[in-house]
Amino acid sequence: MTVVVGHNGTKESTMSRYSKILLSAAMLIYIGSLLTLLKMMRIIDNQEVGDHIMSPEKIKDKMTNTAKPPKDLGQPTSTTKTKQYTELATAIAAKWNLTTPNAIDLLVHQFEKTNDYDPEHDFFHFHHLYKSGGTSISNFMDKTVGLRKVGKYWEGILPGSYESGDFDHDEALKDINKRLAEGTKREDLPYRASYAHTGLRPVYGPRRTKTAKFFQEQMPNKRLRAITMLREPTDFRASNHAMIMCGLNAEIQKFNQQRARKGLEHVCSPKDGLNVSALVDIKTQNLIDKCQSGAKVNAQQKQQCEDHANGVDIFEHCRSPSHLLAHYQYDKHYRSMFKGLMGRYHR
């Protein structure tokens, strides 16, 4: 019995020592962790520990009085955007010699303007300036605002629109009258847009265009909007020169068709092997053959044939940029970038 009691007492004494040791170790670990945490807090904020032991009111007050601005993550602020817009507008105004006193402000306003297009009440006309990618825009309009195609027309596109031609007012009026006769109310006409080489502006005043007058009379409930697309002037001039003044596009197409039959790739510039001067010779000979054959020619072609007979190189300005710059045609058609070439001669 004594042994048993003695044995139990020894066991309990041993367990008590182990418990004290474990408890002491736990306390040391806890105290060490707490000291480490407090030390880290001082290191991070470079403050005394007491600064972190605050009431909610003190914390709120400290945040209000000492809050640091958020770190800049590279997102532009409204002030930054305005500065960028102003710099861009200034560069544009200088490049295009815009001398209007408020030109820069107007450009900045365009950058910041929000889209206010209303598909139910707006009718927009795309003024397709020659050689400026307008055919692609017109085709895109067919498949977006055009809605569905009914017969030869896209329902949302006003008939009379031509991707590479003038606006046909008679064709448009015919379709409008047809729908009105069928019972469609004028305010319910389905047209949302039109496109052509024909210009819309000015819409009001004594110089109002025929197209603006037509739209206002036939669709009085619509707000008219005009859009267009400009092309980089140098590229625009080059394209206008090649196609409209010199008519070289057809010759280049024939030349590339001949290359394709030989398994060669298409070329479109002298550096790729295109001999523009040789194409001009072919074009000249084709015109002379036409004049000599007795075929019908217009007044300009007749004059060109007579000039050629007198030894004039009738397409000299088409042979190269240097030929163009030295030719009277440059002063006649290319000296101004603010008249014909930038859209004024378009109807």
Image: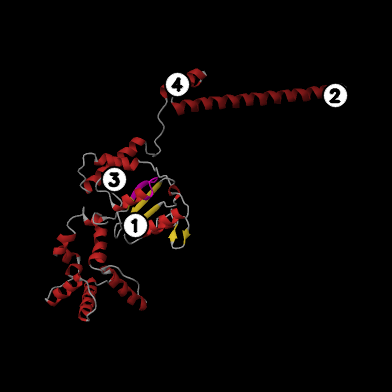
Mark 4 residue crowding within 10 angstroms, few (<14) / some (14–19) / many (20+): few
Residue corresponding to mark 4: 62
Q: In screen coordinates, is 300 left or right of 65?
A: left
Q: In screen coordinates, is 24 left or right of 180?
A: right
- Above or below 270: residue 48: above
Residue corresponding to mark 1: 169
In the image, 191 versus 263, the foreground residue is 191
Disc number placed over residue 204 in the picture, else none = 3
Q: Residue, x 36% and y 56% (percent of image)?
A: 195
Under mark 4, the amino acid is Lys
Instruction: Report which quarter residue 135 is drawn in.
Output: bottom left
Whole-angstrom CA distance, mark 1 to mark 4, is 73 Å
Colour scheme used in the picture?
Answer: secondary structure
Report the mark closest to the observer, 2 or 1.
1
Labels 1 and 4: the sequence-earlier one: 4
Whole-angstrom CA distance, mark 4 to mark 3, is 62 Å
Residue 293: image location, x then y, percent? 22, 81
Question: Circle 4 — which element?
Answer: helix
Residue 304: image location, x then y, percent? 17, 72
Disc number placed over residue 4 in the picture, else none = 2
Question: Circle 1 — which element?
Answer: helix
Disc tally is 4
Question: Circle 2 — which element?
Answer: helix
Labels 4 and 3: the sequence-earlier one: 4
Report the mark closest to the observer, 4 or 3.
3
Residue 113: image location, x then y, percent? 35, 41
Residue 173: image location, x then y, percent? 37, 56
Specify the segment rendered in magenta: 218-226
Q: Which residue in the rendered view is the most extreme toward the bottom? A: 293
Report the mark closest to the observer, 1 or 4.
1
Whole-angstrom CA distance, mark 2 to mark 1, is 122 Å
Q: Is residue 54 visible?
A: no
